[in-house]
Image: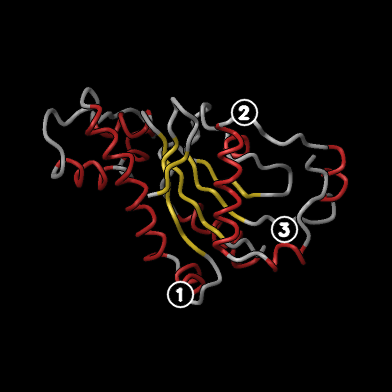
Amino acid sequence: MKNIAITKEVQSAFTPSNVLEDLMEGNNRFVNNNSQTVDNASLINQTTAGQFPKAVVLSCIDSRVPVETVFDQAIGDIFVARVAGNFENIDILGSLEYSCGVAGSKLVLVLGHESCGAVKAACDGVELGNITAMLSNILPAVKKSAEEVDGELNSSNKEFVAKTVENNVKLTIDRIKEKSQILREMEDNGEVKIVGGVYNLHTGKVELL
């Protein structure tokens, strides 16, 4: 049973590789329907005065990808930043910097997912209210995929969508490193890792890129 929250000492002892391994083991438990039981009341009590999460996950808002659940994590374990299309902007960058630079997290994981609605909309050039500006963040991935995939360049092409999901994760990581001196230097110093993955809606499995 998960009934002991992460302390500062435990967080400090983690390495970025340890944390990544821990999340992937949690995902394996989830896939195998063997998730740990959790004493939420105990964790709430222990984390009221402070938190020491080991990682921050940047994910899509998609309701089919409940981040803590798919990595079998509990209260106090991870930060989660969510925006449709799992891209970075100044607010997301600030949140990631806070997670690692201030709160001590050891891993940044950018998590895309299969059949992402935001990616499909970007592939189709959807224009609607504030969604238009939001989707512009995904267009670099759309353009890159258009050079790598054959067939129709819209959401009817599953290969095009899948490639764009992957490219969006990879380009988001590139921009995080480019735009955040804090995170770039922390990674260069071995204090954090910045990695990406894609969640499979059919299997529940996260595949690292």
- Residue under circle 1? 188
Pick the front one: 154 or 11: 11
Q: Earlier in the sequence, mark 3 or mark 1?
A: 3
Q: Helix or strand or loop: what does disc 1 sit on?
A: helix
Q: Which color mode does the image show?
A: secondary structure
* Residue 52: image tag: 3
- Quarter of the N terminus within the rendering: top right
Q: Residue at x 13, y 28 (%)?
A: 152
Query: Within 10 Å of the Cα at label 1, are there few (<14), some (14-19), or many (20+) other Cα atoms?
Result: few
Q: Farthest bottom residue?
A: 189
Q: Earlier in the sequence, mark 2 or mark 3?
A: 2
Pick the front one: 204 or 141: 204
Q: Position of residue 71 (x, y in %)?
A: 59, 41
| Image quadrant where residue 103 sits | bottom right
- The three-letter code of the residue at mark 1 reads Asp
Q: Residue at x 52, y 32 (%)?
A: 65
Q: Position of residue 6 (x, y in %)?
A: 76, 55
Query: Within 10 Å of the Cα at label 2, are there few (<14), some (14-19), or many (20+) other Cα atoms?
Result: few
Vertical placement of residue 6 versus 144, above or below: below
In the rendered structure, the answer to whether residue 154 lies left or right of residue 102 reads left
Q: Earlier in the sequence, mark 1 or mark 2?
A: 2
- Residue under circle 2? 33
- The three-letter code of the residue at mark 2 reads Asn
Q: Helix or strand or loop: what does disc 3 sit on?
A: loop
Query: Within 10 Å of the Cα at label 3, are there few (<14), some (14-19), or many (20+) other Cα atoms?
Result: many
Q: Label 1 vs label 2: CA separation?
A: 37 Å
Q: Helix or strand or loop: what does disc 2 sit on?
A: loop
| Image quadrant where residue 154 sits | top left
